[in-house]
Amino acid sequence: MTEVKAKVIKSNTVILHTASLFLLPLQLLFSMFLLLRGHDEPGGGFIAGLVAAGAFVLYLFAHGVDSTRKILRVEPHDLIGAGLLFGVISALPAIFFGQALLTAQWWSFYLVGTEVKLSTVLLFDLGVYLVVMGSILTIVMSLNEAEE
């Protein structure tokens, strides 16, 4: 029997190379919009993490794993750990106020004349964002490195 090997997905086309450089910051900006919008409305951490991971996967396909690790600046599995830490931290403030675990807490303050509201919900969404992004990138990078 002949063995069929899958090829590593990496493209050297000028169009994909250029498009990935242009789309990476736009996709990351859109993922931040989804993350910040989602703590009051549908959306949030999960879909924002998928969009951010998609941005880095597109860059990975065009430039390779090593270049992607350089622009990411952290290992993807470290993102998973940080996300889990944010999730646990978001559960704790309610205990200090004598409420049930994971009860949302809101804090308001003024910054340059504008009211800014922060909450444990946003912190939890940030944790989900990092876990999803880290998981997808860990899987895709591991598969790509295994083929190389």
Image (tube, rainbow, N blue to C red):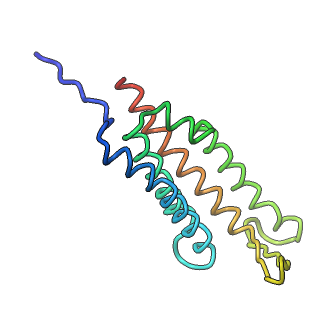
The residue located at (74%, 61%) in the rendering is 90
Out of 126 and 115, give the one closest to the viewer: 115
Which image quadrant: the C terminus?
A: top left
Which image quadrant: the N terminus?
A: top left
Quadrant of res 8: top left
In-image side of 70 versus 53 (left or right): right
In-image side of 88 versus 93 (left or right): left
Tell me where residue 59 appears, x and y as whole percent. Answer: 43, 44
Q: Is 39 located above or below residue 77 in the figure?
A: below
Q: Is 42 located above or below residue 54 in the figure?
A: below
In-image side of 37 versus 63 (left or right): right
Out of 11 and 102, give the one closest to the viewer: 11
Q: Furthest-top residue in view?
A: 1
The residue located at (68%, 67%) in the rendering is 122
The residue located at (31%, 43%) in the rendering is 14
Tell me where residue 147 appears, x and y as whole percent. Answer: 34, 25
Tell me where residue 117 appears, x and y as whole percent. Answer: 76, 77
The residue located at (65%, 56%) in the rendering is 127
Tell me where residue 67 appears, x and y as whole percent. Answer: 50, 34
Q: Furthest-left residue in view?
A: 1
Out of 96 and 100, give the one closest to the viewer: 96
